[in-house]
Amino acid sequence: MLKTNPNADYSSYFIEPSSAVHKQYLALRSFFADGQTAEQVAKATGYSASTVYSMVRDFKEKLKSDGEDPFFKESKTGRKPIDHEGEIEEAVINLRKKYFSVPDIQVAMDAMGLNLTIYAIEKILKDAGFARLPRRDKQFRSEVVSSHGPPKMATPVASRIELEFDVFSSGLAGLLCILPYIVKYGIDKAISDSPYPETKDISRISSILSFVALKLSNIKRYSADDVWCMDRGMGLFSGLNVLPKTAWFSSYSSAVTRDMNVAFLKSLQSIWLNNGLLSDTVNLDFTAIPYWGDGDPFENNWSGKRGKALASIQALLAQDPENGIICYGDTTIRHANQDAVVLEFLDFYHTNKQADNNLKYLIFDSKFTT
């Protein structure tokens, strides 16, 4: 480090970048200002030529879209704005009225760009006459928080983030421990190469990882934009500042087709096989996904968990019994085609010779097919 080395060569700061953002800046400077080709820049910086082209494309789009400098931000001088109108205090108190704990309040305020310390939040609550919340287990706390609506202050809009040093609070940062496994098995590449939809602001991989983040968080209810859509740790998991709102998830799900899912399942199947994670046996069974909305667009299906038939989506799950991997699924099943689903599953396997030769046994109950 320069500051701890009295004999440091300060010119190295401009020649040998110590951060990813600094390295990107020097690479783009060589491309635009020095007139080097992408291949020359790649050789000098260690990037691949395709990465350089992607950086150039993203840099141009960034300047065209909002005109903001992607590398240098002007620092604002002077004292931080004082909460003259009591907006911050009102937001903190409003969150406590919805039984948010102090850490949950800090997470929500961080997401809104208001970096309050634990001490500051506790002081606001103490001055307002609030007592400490009783100790609650994780499940009860999640259910209470999810059952209340969003705070009055507007929550941020999800957008792609640039990786740089930052400090923030998160109640679900443990999700980040899953990312090395996603990279290890190449699942991130499988998502990027999939036909799933994406937008200018939310890429394909960020979209899919947003769904994964919600599933891994064990949050029971997504019907209200609550603390999960303000947690920057969950956003970071998906490469975003925060997760998108509930309406976005519904809209995105409507744009995903069965063909997209099958193509992605085939990519995952190759990953599992190449890593020796699939045995020669597959368990097949139906499961009912209950529908609690208005109207009755779905057929009644038997739910073993609830011991009765109810309006639901009839879904097929194929599971490897040794590793527990769900290697195939289908949620487009109706009563009319239910018996033929096993043949559709075999057709899926026949398209991959490696998988087809590996599969020896199918296990299912007597009511699964005729």
Image (cartoon, rainbow, N blue to C red):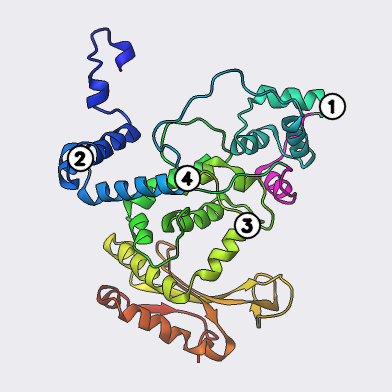
Structural distance between the alpha carbons of marks 4 and 2: 29 Å
- Front residue of 148/178: it is 148
Q: Nearer the viewer's eye, disc 1 or disc 2? A: 2
Which quadrant is home to the N terminus? top left
Q: Are marks 2 and 3 in contact (CB under 8 Å)?
A: no
Residue 316 position within the rendered picture, expressed as x and y whole percent measured from the top left: 51, 76
**Label whose residue precedes the other's in the sequence (4 or 2):** 2
Q: Nearer the viewer's eye, disc 1 or disc 3? A: 3
Q: Secondary structure at mark 2?
A: loop
Magenta stretch holds residue 160: no
**Label whose residue precedes the other's in the sequence (1 or 2):** 2
**Label whose residue precedes the other's in the sequence (1 or 4):** 4
Residue 280 occupies quadrant: bottom left
Q: Provide the residue designation for mark 4.
A: 66
The crowd level at tag 4 (other Cα within 10 Å; few <14, some 14-19, many 20+) is few
Q: Provide the residue designation for mark 3.
A: 246
- Front residue of 146/143: it is 146
Above/below status of 66 relative to 338: above
Label ID, residue 261: none
Structural distance between the alpha carbons of marks 1 and 4: 44 Å
Residue 311 occupies quadrant: bottom right
Q: Provide the residue designation for mark 2.
A: 46
Circle 1: residue type: Gly
Q: Write down the region rendered in magenta.
A: 132-152
Magenta stretch holds residue 147: yes
Above/below status of 261 relative to 48: below
